Image (spheres, rainbow, N blue to C red):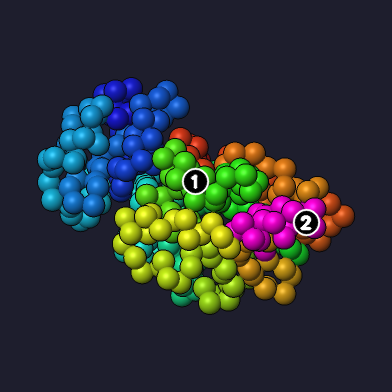
């Protein structure tokens, strides 16, 4: 992609292999064609089945479409060989997938000297041994760019790590960590059924194709784990209490059957909304962590003057109370969903390696 900015024979400052050419990966490919990425060279790209390592093909604008129809069979060994053959001092694997199988390889790649930049939460927000393996691998000197895993690149992780480096300590954390759930509860006022709003959010691309991926709360729980672990809390997945929004009767259905029964969500949520409204409160899907390491994700009532009650659209919000930000929390807020901002976070992490 960025090979257009320099002869293909020139040694780039950083060489990149991109894993995942879906919505976020596609947005990242577009950014590689901008002047900001002129010092970078894409030397390999792959979807789940096919890959391309030919520089001329990689520089073509229809790379995503090419990979859907042609290309060599997926072979990570060949992709890493392309990185090694680039001659670049900075060799980066960009994981723009949500694959748990790929995430388990991040520590291995780091230990072998490859930098990893990712939007994939499955390692840092997965089982605790995976987190510990990641920390051990980082001791080898390679770097892990994870800005896109929480808040779609909002400066949350970087701020948290900087505070901790300066001797500050996180006391409590609270916020809205999901763009899709933010949109839904910012919009839900009881005048229309929740299922109608959910259909609209899905059509706009705010939710996953199967909205249960958002409604379950598991994605929010992973983000909370990532933040908690970076703050020094060694929490396991089973230590986050998750109250999802999907009734048990709808959890095992295929996607189409679930979508056909969305109206079964309406009654319970309408009742909770009415109860909250009677108390002058609103509903928000919150993540919370206290200083004893107790973590919870789920629907909560908050007063109308609560910071989370004043969000707009798909905004995320992170309120950090620390030993130094004690009287008033440090609040980080902004768009927390979307392929463009997520891809920009990936590019920012890649550029920071140089």
How many discs mark residues in the rendered view? 2
Given residues 298 and 101, the one toward you in this image is: 298
Task: Let me know if residue 278 is in the magenta part.
Answer: yes
**Residue displayed at 50% across by 37% down:** 341
Q: Is residue 106 visible?
A: no
Q: Is residue 131 visible?
A: yes
* Callout 2 touching callout 1 (CB < 8 Å): no
**Residue displayed at 29% across by 30% down:** 1
How crowded is the residue under tag 2: few (<14 C-alpha within 10 Å), some, or many (20+)? few
| Local SS, label 1 | helix
Given residues 66 and 207, the one toward you in this image is: 207
**Mark 2 → mark 1, Cα distance in angstroms:** 23 Å
| Local SS, label 2 | helix
> For residue 61, which quarter of the picture?
top left
Q: Please, is residue 212 above or below residue 19 in the view?
A: below
Question: Which contiguous range is marked in magenta?
Answer: 269-288
Task: Let me know if residue 134 is in the magenta part.
Answer: no
Residue 82 location in percent, x, y?
22, 45
Residue 253 location in percent, x, y?
34, 65
Q: Residue 304 carries which label?
A: none
Q: Which residue position is annotated with label 2?
A: 278
Given residues 78 and 215, the one toward you in this image is: 215
Q: Please, is residue 33 above or below residue 178 in the view?
A: above
Q: In this view, does 21 lie to the left or right of 250?
A: left
**Residue displayed at 31% across by 62% down:** 254
Q: Is residue 287 left or right of residue 220?
A: right
Q: Please, is residue 140 above or below residue 95 in the view?
A: below
Q: Residue 196 carries which label?
A: 1
Residue 22 location in percent, x, y?
32, 43
Q: Earlier in the sequence, mark 2 or mark 1?
A: 1
């Amino acid at each position: 992609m960025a090979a257009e900015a320099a002869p293909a024979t020139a040694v780039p400052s950083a060489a990149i292999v991109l894993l995942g050419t879906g919505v976020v990966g596609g947005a990242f490919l577009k950014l590689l064609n901008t002047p900001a990425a002129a010092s970078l060279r894409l030397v390999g790209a792959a979807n789940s089945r096919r890959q391309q390592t030919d520089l001329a093909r990689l520089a073509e604008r229809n790379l995503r479409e090419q990979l859907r129809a042609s290309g060599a069979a997926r072979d990570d060994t060949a992709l890493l060989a392309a990185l090694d053959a680039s001659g670049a001092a900075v060799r980066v694997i960009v994981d723009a997938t949500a694959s748990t199988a790929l995430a388990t390889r991040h520590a291995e790649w780091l230990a072998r000297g490859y930098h990893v930049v990712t939007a994939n939460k499955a390692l840092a927000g997965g089982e605790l041994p995976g987190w510990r393996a990641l920390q051990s691998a980082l001791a080898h000197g390679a770097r892990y760019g994870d800005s896109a895993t929480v808040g779609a690149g909002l400066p949350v992780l970087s701020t948290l790590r900087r505070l901790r480096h300066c001797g500050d300590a996180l006391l409590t954390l609270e916020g809205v960590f999901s763009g899709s759930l933010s949109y839904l509860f910012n919009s839900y006022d009881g005048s229309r059924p929740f299922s109608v709003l959910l259909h609209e959010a899905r059509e706009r691309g705010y939710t996953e194709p199967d909205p249960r991926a958002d409604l379950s709360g598991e994605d929010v729980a992973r983000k909370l784990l990532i933040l908690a672990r970076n703050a020094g809390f060694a929490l396991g997945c089973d230590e986050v209490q998750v109250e999802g929004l999907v009734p048990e009767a709808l959890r095992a259905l295929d996607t189409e059957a679930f979508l056909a029964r969305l109206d079964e969500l309406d009654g319970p949520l309408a009742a909770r909304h009415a109860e909250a409204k009677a108390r002058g409160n609103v509903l928000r899907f919150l993540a919370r962590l206290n200083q004893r390491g107790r973590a919870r994700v789920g629907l909560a009532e908050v007063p109308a003057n609560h910071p989370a009650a004043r969000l707009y659209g798909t905004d995320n919000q992170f309120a950090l109370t620390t030993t130094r930000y004690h009287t008033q929390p440090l609040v980080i807020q902004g768009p927390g969903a979307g392929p463009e901002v997520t891809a920009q976070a990936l590019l920012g992490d890649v550029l920071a390696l140089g």
